[in-house]
Amino acid sequence: MVSSLVLFLLNTFIAYVAASSDYYERLLIRPLPQSSVLTSFNFRSNESADAFEHQNFRYFPRSLGQILQHAGTKELHLRFALGRWDAESWGQRPWNGAREGGTGVELWAWVEAQSEEEAFARWLTLTNALSGLFCASLNFIDATKTIRPVMTFQPEGYHANSSNLHLLHGTLPHEVVCTENLTPFLKLLPCKGKAGISSLLNGHKLFDASWQTMSIDVRPMCGPGGGDCTLEMEQTVDMVLDIDRSKRPRDNPIPRPLPIEEIECDTSKGYNGGDTCYPLDKSEEPAWNLTEIFGQPLKGACPLTEQSGEGSMTVCINTPPERILQVNTTGQYEEAKLASDTVRCYKLPTGADFDLVLPQQRMTTGLVLTGPQLFAARSINGHGQERGSVQAVIKNPSSHSVEFVYLESLPWFMKPYLHTLRARVDNSLENPVKETYYRPAVDRKRGTHLELRMIIPPASTLTLTYDFDKAILRYTEYPPDANRGFDVAPAVIRLINPGSSDNKGIYLRTTSLLLPLPTPDFSMPYNVIILTSTVMALGFGNIFNLLVRRFVGIDEVQAGGAGGLQGVLRGKIDSLKALFGRG
Amino acid sequence: MALISTLLALRKDARLLKIPPYLSALCIIVGVVWLLVLPLQEYSRNTYVSENALLPGQVHTYFTGSEHNIFRAYRHEVASLGDRTTQERNQRLGDILRSSNLKVATQKYSYATSGRNISDENVYAILQGPRADATEAIVLIAAWRNMDNEINHSGVALVLTLARYFKRWSLWSKDIIILISGDSTSGPQAWVDAYHNSHNPETIESLSIKSGALQGAIAIDYPAGPWGHRYDKLHIVYDGVNGQLANLDLFNTAVSVASGQMGIGCTLQRMWKHDDSYKERLQTMLRGMISQGVGHASGPHSSFIPYHVDAITLQTVGDGWHDEMSLGRTVESLFRSLNNLLEHLHQSFFFYLLLHANRFVSIGTYLPSAMLIAVNFSITSIALWVASGRAGKIPNPASTVPPATPGEKSTSSITTKTPMTVAKKDGMIALIPTALLQTNERALFLPLAFVLATHFLGLLPLYIFNNTHSSYLDLTFTIVALLSTLLPHLTAFSLKRFSRPTEQETILIQCFSLLLLGMFLAALATLNFSLSVLIGIATSPLTFIRSTKNKPVSGALSLLLAVLNPMVIIRGATFYFGQDIMSVLVKAAEGWHVWGLWTQVVVWLVWWPAWFAGSVVVSGGLFA
Amino acid sequence: MASEPQKALLFAAAAAVRLLLFTAFPSLPSLLAGRVEVSTPVTSFKRLQEGLFLYTRNVSPYDGGVYHQAPLLLPLFSLLPNPSYSPFATNVFYTMVDLLSAYALMQIANSGQATVTRLFTSSRKELRWSSVAIAAGFLFNPFTVATCIARSTSALTNLFILTAMAKASQGATITFVLSMAMASYLAMHPVLLFPPLLILCYDVQSTKMKASPHTFRFIATHSRRLIIALGALLYLSKLLTGSWDFLGATYGVRLLLPDLTPNVGLWWYFFTEMFDSFREFFLGVFWLHVASYMPGLTIRLRKQPLFVATTLTGIFAIFTPYPSIADAALYLSLVPVFRHLFPLMRYTFLASSSILYTSFLGPAFYHLWIYAGSGNANFFYAITLVWSLGLSVIVGDSLYAALRDELDVERPELRGKEVKRI
């Protein structure tokens, strides 16, 4: 408990520090259970508002700055995420989830514009420019993937001096985040991954993590009274590395079975023997060091960071005090202990590699992790490609009731029925839904946007369900892997608790869903056109044939050639009958 | 139009009415022969994997070495759980799974069918794939007790070992769900129902943790005791409830991995020895058809298939030199293949008949046989319809050709007997029996009502058999069999007595009942080909019976029909296959309540009514 | 014609059957409402509920892709208690709708316009079924029952179409025009029924008041009345929803087919597979095709307007964008009114057995495609083709019979002889 509380303070402290200095970076390492370790990188660079206006960029990347100015974007939040945060065993999310996004890419921004249309036009400019900058398919965020949330997102920055801002939000759940997104991300940093903690960031390890998220946040910050405004850009990379997995050398990544002598057997078992071994799970903290798990060394400090004080302590590790730490470097470094020694920070040497070594060790005290305030899981019920129902289960383990906003942004071809929306709390009868915002989808124009403000009582589970239909698309609207299904963006949950000091808010995201749609046969448009037309022609021909001709007795028309084809056929049939006649 | 009108003219020709019986017979014969021809090499194809993503057997497998020691240890653990209670057992299994960092949960379930109560508990664990985002999952199943109700020692142990082994890999792009179900049929059913939320929460516990859409499931059945047993072949079970089959690609992948990569022979449909001969292939096909036709759950995988989750069971059979690790490597390679899948399995066939581990017949080739058999009923019913339109008997009538042909004599000879209509045609005269020109009206009410009533009557035995206590089932069967043998005669008698159906009405009864039969069988042929064929063949005599005034003939016919009584046939079949009718009925009831088995519905609402209507028509002749 | 007790018994039985089904199988309505064969995007009850939900919460139901039905249904159904909690009122309502339709059908049958019109008297006019039998055919038609249980709004459309026909065949002009307007307002395409029914109305009036009214004036007045009625309905809807958006969301959807949910018709798969550049063109062609039948039939069968109307309902059941078995039910229950044509029909057995086959194979194939995943869309598509073919055979055959019947009157000497068309 203590440690994480301290960590929380630490975060806020960082925020305070950030306001003063121009460039600031920090790596926070925190070992987690099940031999995994959370490493969260945090970079901040500021630019004074007028310098930014005059296109005078120092730490703020020009490429991004100009895009923002061109698109009239006042505040920007961009997220790349991969994998799942295992809340049961890893506890609370880093930055309370405020710096992470749903699987894939998520983008929301406050755009300054006179009208909705102008705002949307600028939004498109922004997404297209960013997709170029980050090598991501952000340009696919079109009207059908864009919503305008009303309750879920609050501006983090200071916007008193800018009027009619429009919040737009878009997601790409199917986007696969990978190294091509990391490289431009590093390019934005002043030290470009050459020095400082960013020199640890290596695509192979980063995208082999169990969970990882990259975020970019740009927001205007002003002092009290709106004076001396600065534009602050914050970049974070959070990832959970599996130590065993990351320690494997890159040339031999295959987890071959260990030689039997390396496995710790349970000798108390009766059957234990040379060929039989009941494996014991490791009780010791594994040995690891930075260079090993990141695959490359930490190349000294970034010269742009402060030389002294809090801001210079750029590597922190949050472990119980008894955990043995060895620093392995040739250069000068300083160590500082914070928060009753559960957090140890280091000032990196300049120009010399720096490494932290943690030997294998049997621990007596563990690190206390606070559990998250809510657990959320979402799944699709029912089977078949015609309809289904979404079920979201939200657990509140805490002893106080929690108020939160639940945001769904669904694609248009998933047609929810709001009248089937049911929210039940297992131990109370009152309806937890306090407020609803609903904007139904329009085919091929916009997606569904649903926001619910709900209160969940202490120690209870809230189940939210609603039915939906699956639309069948035109065959040109299906992707090449039509039978995989379509991804549905994760639901965003924002906790509303008055107690929170910082204006970032506490967020939580469910996993994305896979929505299989009915598929036509892609191979036969021609056949379909031909067959349908044939049936229509048959009906039409038959009826109009009757309408336009007149009847006469069969004995009034000349047989033979007179009737043309009819005559011929008639003749044929007659001879046929003649044949029968004989038999 | 001209063509149609001339065809109409033909339709009025009485000789056409003689053709249908032969036509139907032809259909039936061709249909059956067609079936027998299929096993020839010329008509079957070699299996092939059509989903490119699968790449079966392309990866090297590493499940060896120290894993073997661990496997042995786990097998001892499992063996020691044999006599424990379900709770203790699942607690222990859960602990083992937890120790390899998986999310574990349990599910209680209980079903009540024919007075018995099936209740047990599933334990399952989810391995969250590092590359996965919880949208897709594949399932690895080991039932605690297999179909023969022996404890699946090595199977469960292998699954535990594999779970621990898989956890180390970082390449899983789908979640892997480890399911250890209480038994082989109800357990998986309860689990998969709950997974899709189509369960009844009172009797079946909902799942506390879930993952994404299921992409495939592999079940392992390896009931070797704590000291192991080396097996000879893998028996791959692929048919699901109601005769729905797993995608052929999955089966092919399993075969090519097992035999191609691991060198383990594969067999199917309990054909332990299969020298690729015509006889063996035919036998395999017929066995496959029978088990498909019965539509029962043939393994833990069966319950998954109705949810469009392709699944198979790998059974170890015989004594040989393959050990558990080779089975483990097979599963590993199989999972690597499934892990490659980009789309849900959809490329390959869902309708097929397997003749051998690597020969199959696709729907296009075999469907005609079922359709022909179904069509013969339709043909007869059309013929009967036309016949019912006739005003009594017409002597061989003249054709409409002008009397220049030798037809003339007959024409003139008839002229004396039957009322003739003179048709002038380009100066020549044709004489046509008037009766041919007017089709007389049909009285449809009684036949329709009767046939519909018959079909609804089928609901009664359906209900009875699914809701009788198991101890009375045997008795019930005998009683119902007796009743259903007597009922037609009673009905026929009372019909004669009270409503006196005209000859036309009797014909129409048969017409409609055959029409419905043909229709149902045609529809069924697309859902469950084998069942359609089996019933089609069993009911084929109904095509040829007619109601006659001739007492001995109708007596003989009704005797024949008494033998063709569905219940008699079922009894005979169970006797032939050495099954106990009692257990069959119990299984059927269980299928109805647990797996949603439809076979009884077909028997009681399609087969039985058709037979009933037929025998009423026949025994009508007895009371003429 | 029909004795009162018979009628009462029939209606009681029909109502009993429906209410029994509603109460005995509470899950049946929602099941049927989910069947694509029964309820289409423009008639589905579930979508109606969604529209109601939004309407009662002052969200415009037309600012979304779900609700495509007429605005006036909203206040009507908002009067009834919420069907998801207390469905009884709704069930009774739909039962009543069916009974009223049956009553209208009986009026049509009793009017005898099927056999004897002003200009034409069938030579087989003695050959007819009692109106009770015909009504029974409608009420116990499984398609009608399914539609009623599924609570699809096409039941209402059918009611108004039948009422329009009934009133026309009685010469009650005002009610005829009103119900005509209502039907067209609900489903748009019934407006094509106006000309034939107007002729029918004209004939009946002139036979009633021995002198025929001035033709042109008659047409003008009634067309004007229809336009006024329609305009009033639309304006009322505008007042109700506060904007003209509903036009695009209701009639626009019927015209342009943005929602490709499968149904028994020919349009959905065609436009699923259609190349984008040709979509508009073929939409135009298809609508032209549907509309083209009306003038042709009306002119050729000037003497039997009621038959023209009936045939048109058949055409609707085949060639409109969102047909369902409800439309087929309407047509199939109107055909028995022309009992006297049956002897002249040639493919009755063929067509009816194809309808029978498809109505069983359809659900089976749909299951294979959507749930089992073992078949693909072509399975269900093929069945819809056969279904449409079967219906069009019946339509064509009955048309042949009607023409042949006329011929027998014109030239009695040809009766019962082979004829051919030149």
Image: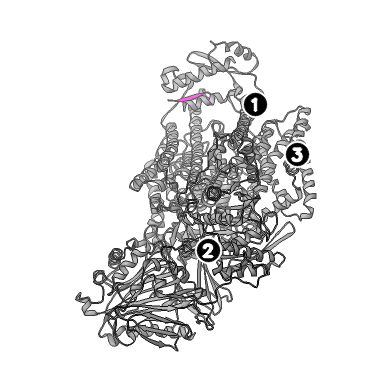
Q: Nearer the viewer, residue C50 or B74?
A: B74
Q: Amino acid at mark 3?
A: Pro
Contact between marks 3 and 1 (CB within 8 A): the answer is no
Marks 2/3: CA–CA distance: 71 Å
Q: Position of residue C286 (x, y in %)?
A: 39, 43
Labels 3, 1: front one: 3
Q: Amino acid at mark 2?
A: Pro
Q: Read off the residue under disc 3.
A: B488
Q: Which residue occupies 79% across, 55% down?
A: B471
- First to last magenta residue range: C415-422
Q: Is residue B158 left or right of residue A200?
A: right
Q: Is residue A411 magenta?
A: no
Protein chain holding label 3 = B
Q: Which residue occupies 60% across, 70% down?
A: A265
Secondary structure under tag 3 reads: helix
Q: Nearer the viewer, residue B472 or C64?
A: B472
Marks 1/2: CA–CA distance: 87 Å
Q: Read off the residue under disc 2.
A: A257
Secondary structure under tag 2 reads: loop
Kindly identify which numbered label has been placed on residue B391: 1
Tell me the crowding category of disc 2: few under 14, some 14 to 19, or many 20 or more residues within 10 angstroms, Cα based.
Answer: some
Q: Residue furthest bottom?
A: A340
Which picture quadrant has residue A407?
bottom left
Q: Amino acid at mark 1?
A: Ala
Using the image, determine if residue B114 lies above or below residue A376.
Answer: above
